[in-house]
Image (spheres, rainbow, N blue to C red):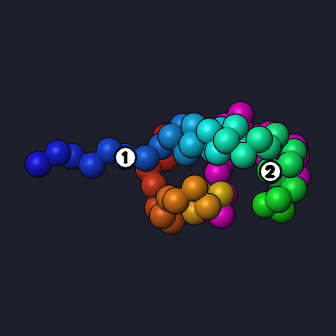
């Protein structure tokens, strides 16, 4: 039996960056689409703020994940 890999903020950010690239969106456009200010979105992308649940959920993550 293999152990389940813990999901980290870095994992979610990597998935978010890939999503933005596939969708052809920049941070400002994405922020507007999810109701966040561009500076707040920048802070998320730089790891200065926690990832909001609505973004994690949009990427397919459940309410709980391991934070690092």
Q: Residue 12: name its quadrant.
A: top right
21, 30: nearer the viewer: 21
Mark sitting on residue 30: 2
Mark sitting on residue 56: none
Q: Secondary structure at mark 2?
A: helix
Residue at image position (82%, 52%) is 31
- Does residue 53 appear to the left or right of 8 in the view shown? right
Q: Position of residue 27 (x, y in %)?
A: 81, 42
Mark sitting on residue 6: 1
Q: Position of residue 32 (x, y in %)?
A: 87, 56
Q: Over which residues does the magenta segment extend?
A: 36-54
Extreme residue in the top direction: 46
Residue at image position (65%, 57%) is 55
Give the foreground label among 2 and 1. Answer: 2
Is the residue 42 above or below the residue 53 in the image?
Answer: above
- Does residue 48 appear to the left or right of 11 in the view shown? right
Mark 2: give few (<14), some (14-19) or many (20+) Cα within 10 Å: some
Earlier in the chain: of badge 2 and badge 1, it is: 1
Mark 1: give few (<14), some (14-19) or many (20+) Cα within 10 Å: few
Q: Secondary structure at mark 1?
A: loop
Is the residue 23 above or below the residue 47 in the image?
Answer: below
Q: Position of residue 37 (x, y in %)?
A: 88, 52
54, 50: nearer the viewer: 54
């Amino acid at each position: 039996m293999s152990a389940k890999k813990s999901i980290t903020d870095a994992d979610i950010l990597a998935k978010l960056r890939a999503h933005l690239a596939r969708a052809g969106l920049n941070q400002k456009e994405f922020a507007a689409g999810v109701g966040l200010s561009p500076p707040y979105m920048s802070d998320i992308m730089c790891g200065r703020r926690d990832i909001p649940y609505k973004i994690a959920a949009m990427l397919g993550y459940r309410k709980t994940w391991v934070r690092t």
